[in-house]
Amino acid sequence: MKVLLVDDEQVILTVSRQALSDVAREVVTFTDPRDALNTDLSSFDVILSDFYMPEMRGDEFLREVRKAAPEVPFIFLTQNEDLSVAVELMRQGADDYVSKPINPTNFVFRIKKTIHEKERDRQIQQVLEEQRLLDLENQKLANWRVLYASKDARLTEKLVTNLARNINQAGGFLWLDLLSGSLTQADDDNYLVPRSVMDMAINSARNQETLFNQVTYIGSLDTMELEMTTVSTEVFHENVQTMITERLLPILKTYDRTFRWNTVPPAAPRNTSVRADMDRVYDVLLELTINAIKFSPAGTALVYDLVYEEERGTDMLTLKVSSVARRLQATDKDGNHIYGIPYDFKEQVFDLFFSIEAFPEYLPEEKWTDGSGLYIARRLMRLMDGWIIAHSGIDYTPDPPQPLVRMDVRVPLHRDGTNDNG
């Protein structure tokens, strides 16, 4: 974890830093809380502060911290006789307190416990917010939300629905009765079967095989062994460019889409590398391209860009896939058609089978059918310590402005050696 520690006593800073040496990747210390306010407070996993300081009291410091970083856990360091003060500070927004003199074992335990509880509270609030949205849906205040699901239970229901639909499209298991009732024995070892019954059985089996393979693939993701290679950022840029120009461009042309690609390599720090399974990276990129084709107007361009970013002290490459958003069948509560992904459902599209339309169109080039692709793509990136983030909004650079959907694929950078032959 990354820790911010504020105390006007140098000995407390020294003891605390030593106690945190095995559990913190970075400890930033200040003796003046006013200096601490000039840092990016939201980048810390936890903030610890003394109360009695000459430049600014701890409660004043807490109020300023909560303005800039309301979600970061905040722990006060107090003297044993100041417990009543500590309780009052918790009423004002602190998450916990630790008594001085510091006991290293208890100190670390209380910090970890506070961070864990804060994360648990955040997850609870997220669930409550999702429940609130579902309540709005039930009240018919946002009718388009019924086109989205919620949480893993809905994912399972989607699987069952797709299974039932695929089976029924081929006549269900009616072919079993037809087959058993229409067999004519030709000799001791052979039977004659009407062609119509055999075609129905074959089609049904193929549909069920497709869905079975898909479900099996999803179930194997957690134990999948990746073929990870280490390449420099420059080589990774070249590999992605090759994927786009040689493997994705024919698909884009088939569906009347063009592409733009930033040929300039990202300005990443020197001697940085990417560890990834390049075959799985292509699978993810293919899924995002297929998704962009489905939900963008014909004749528009997909924009690919690979950039260097730094977030909370972590170097990363971000592959951005952007497309103009097509008008959807879904409407908001006022009857207006929706473009792209509604802002408060950008995360949910990855947790579930994405089906913004009642029956998404199928493209022969897609690897994962029935809308499961975004879910699988994010799971694959997680296996590579990466992530995918969805963005939906308006691009004001053209005239007139256009609705835009962008998917960001993030992979961490490493500062160790590289293998440029990857």
Image (cartoon, helix red, strand yellow):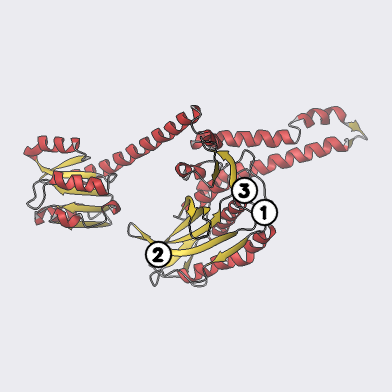
| Residue pointed to by mark 1 | 365
Query: Where does residue 108 sit, x and y in percent of width and height?
Result: 22, 46
- The label number, if any, that marks residue 259 in the structure image: none
Give the distance between the C-alpha atoms of the residues marked 3 and 2, in whole angstroms.
Answer: 31 Å
| Residue pointed to by mark 3 | 368
| Residue pointed to by mark 2 | 414
- The secondary structure type at the circle numbered 1 is loop
Of labels 1 and 2, the one closer to you? 1
Q: Nearer the viewer, residue 152 or 51?
A: 51
Q: Nearer the viewer, residue 283 or 261?
A: 261
In the image, farthest residue toward the right: 186
Q: Nearer the viewer, residue 385 or 137?
A: 137
Judged left or right of residue 47, residue 242 is right
Res 105 seen here: no
Give the distance between the C-alpha atoms of the residues marked 3 and 1, in whole angstroms.
Answer: 9 Å
Hey, what amino acid is under mark 2? His
- The secondary structure type at the circle numbered 2 is strand
